[in-house]
Amino acid sequence: MGFKELISVIDKDRKLYVQMHRPPDPDCLASASVLSDMLQSVGFNPQIVYTGLISKPETMELIDNLGIKLIRLDTESNKQLIRAEDQIIVVDCQKENSNVARLPGEYIACIDHHPALADASYPYADIRPEYGACSSLIYEYAADFGYEISPVQAALMIYGIRIDTDDLSRRKYLMDIDIFSALYKIANLDILSSIGRNAIRPEDISTTIIAYENLTIKNNVAYSFAGDDKAKESLAELADKLISLADVSFVVVYSKCFNGYNFSIRSQINALHAGKIAKYAFSKVNGDGGGHMFMAGGLIPKVTFMDLLGGRAVMERVISIIEDAIENVNNEANGAVATV
Ligand SMILES: [Mn+2]
């Protein structure tokens, strides 16, 4: 595994794209950007592509200030850009993820730090969930290959690591801490201190107010409805905030969208595996969910709530779906066998 092995699967005569997930976050952006610079340094001509909207002001600022060139695919002019014969590398995600648009090209490689999906197969796959950030994997590629990371790239990667590890406070990411400190020594500190400012959008304030008004805490689990049509990233930010509430070790936030309800889930304790609970909970009600130990998400389709009148009743059903999942996932983990 490493940069040399990665480039050995790339065909120089075919077009090359680096695909990010939707919407790209700082870690994804840093990984795609530095990887594509590295590929360029050895004679490839990759282009970074994504779908969806980048709505976070600090992410847009980052892209502008650092001059990162990205191609958004779902605009009329770019829709037909990628052909079946083109090559795609996915970073910080896997082609089967629900937030990754399936493009017509050949998925030749995947570099990710999320748990490997069963059916994901690539000529080159480097999937290491023990890392807190994909930027850390890319750092290792650069260090092993002897690629010199610039002060600007280092600042960008540090920001990616900070966001994905919640300022290195998520446990067990020792590798990321060493890499963080190595990057810190080369990073442009002016850029580093300016990144991430202006992070609050005016609409975030109203989302936060709605979420706190609709907050219910039961058995150390916080449930909150954040209002209609909230962006997934706003839900994720909100979940990160709510997990810091006293006596709360698990958070479930949701928003109504056109086809159902979007969820963002956080856990603070090993005993409640967010990804497993989300997977269990949502699959039981015709939805779809999953994720890490501490972060997860999912969608429950409209039909699940069809018989319900409104907000309070939806919340009650959400609570029962999650409580049921917590109980069952814990039973499975404890090796309980159903008696017949
Ligand atoms: Mn990441």
Image: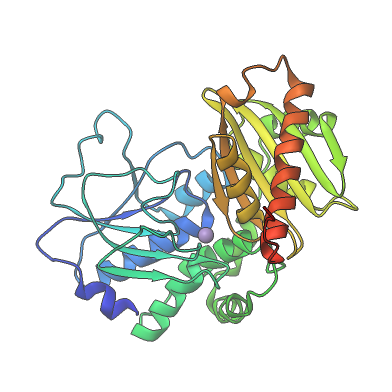
On the question of residue 150 being in view, the answer is: no
**Foreground residue, 250 or 239?**
250
| Placement of 1 over or under 326, stated as above or below | below
| Residue under the point 58% across and 66% down | 161
Q: Which residue is pictured at 82% across the width and 53% down the height?
A: 244
Residue 275: quarter of image: bottom right
- Residue 333 image-quadrant placement: bottom right
**Residue at x 81% of width, y 47% of height:** 221
Whether 39 is drawn above or below 215: the answer is below
Along the line of sight, the residue nearer the viewer: 325 or 176: 325
The x, y position of residue 61, in whole percent, is 53, 46
Q: How many labels were placed on the picture?
A: 0
Q: Is the residue 19 above or below the residue 31 in the image?
A: above
Rendering colour mode: rainbow
Specify the quadrant that holds the N terminus: bottom left
**Extreme front residue here?**
340
Q: As drawn, is 193 to the left or to the right of 210?
A: left
For this orientation, the residue located farthest to the top is 309
| Front-lying residue, 15 or 249 | 249
Percent across and percent down for residue 194 are 62, 56
Q: Position of residue 140 (x, y in %)?
A: 44, 79
Q: Quadrant of residue 76?
A: top left
Q: Residue at x 33, y 34 (%)?
A: 74
- Is residue 194 something that shows in the picture? yes
Q: Is residue 131 left or right of residue 295?
A: left
Query: In this view, which residue lies farthest toward the right?
Result: 246
Q: In the image, 64: left or right of 79?
A: right
Could you say where residue 265 lies in the image, as x and y percent from the top left?
A: 67, 47
